[in-house]
Amino acid sequence: MRAIVSVDQTPKMVNSDDWSSRFYGRTEDYRTTFFDNGIPDTGHGLPTWKSVPSLLKLVLALRAMPKMASPDTPPMKALLADHAAQDWRSTIADTDKPYLMVAGRESQFWPATHASESVEGNSHGRSVVLEKCGHAANMDRPNEFNAAMLEFLVSMK
């Protein structure tokens, strides 16, 4: 592995005294039930009507996926619940590979601050926040996303 890119993914979804860039509304109280009915609407971020083109692309992509990959199946719910219980901050802090944390300023799931907070203290890390962008950064702002990726990749030469 030469480098790592994380696209609008907080390394820790649960709020704690030392981490506030978590999934909106997710606390320890809901650790085992938060995703029981799918991914909840948080009421934050880019309004759905502004993400319609991105959501249409996502729906088309999901239709092409096998049923197993649907977020409504038991295996995917279990995978999402397990992922949501993790804390990847120490893994990111200890990595010796270049990495880029991309955040959507108007993410529907968590504050964009997760990107800059995740790279603090590690010289290999970089962060970029895309304006007027929700969680699906590569679909909401494809040109800006591609520019950030290219700049990161070129900087590794």
Image: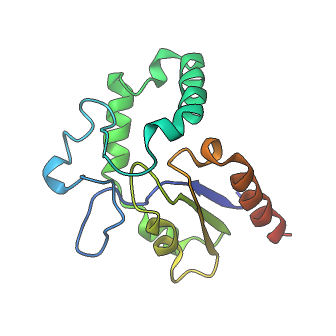
Q: Residue at x 31, y 31 (%)?
A: 38
Above or below 77: residue 136: below
Locate the N terminus by quadrant: bottom right
In the rendered image, is residue 114 in sight? yes
Image coordinates for residue 49, horizontal then vertical, percent: 48, 36
Name the side, left or right, on which 87 lies relative to 33. right
Q: Residue furthest left?
A: 29
Name the side, left or right, on which 145 lies relative to 136. right
The image quarter in which residue 22 lies: bottom left
Q: Residue at x 44, y 23 (%)?
A: 70
Q: Residue at x 33, y 44 (%)?
A: 82
Question: In the depicted view, which residue is nearer to us: 135 or 45?
Answer: 45
Question: In the depicted view, which residue is nearer to us: 70 or 41?
Answer: 41
Image coordinates for residue 124, horizontal then vertical, percent: 64, 76
Locate the C terminus by quadrant: bottom right
Q: How was the colour assigned to the protein in this rendering?
A: rainbow
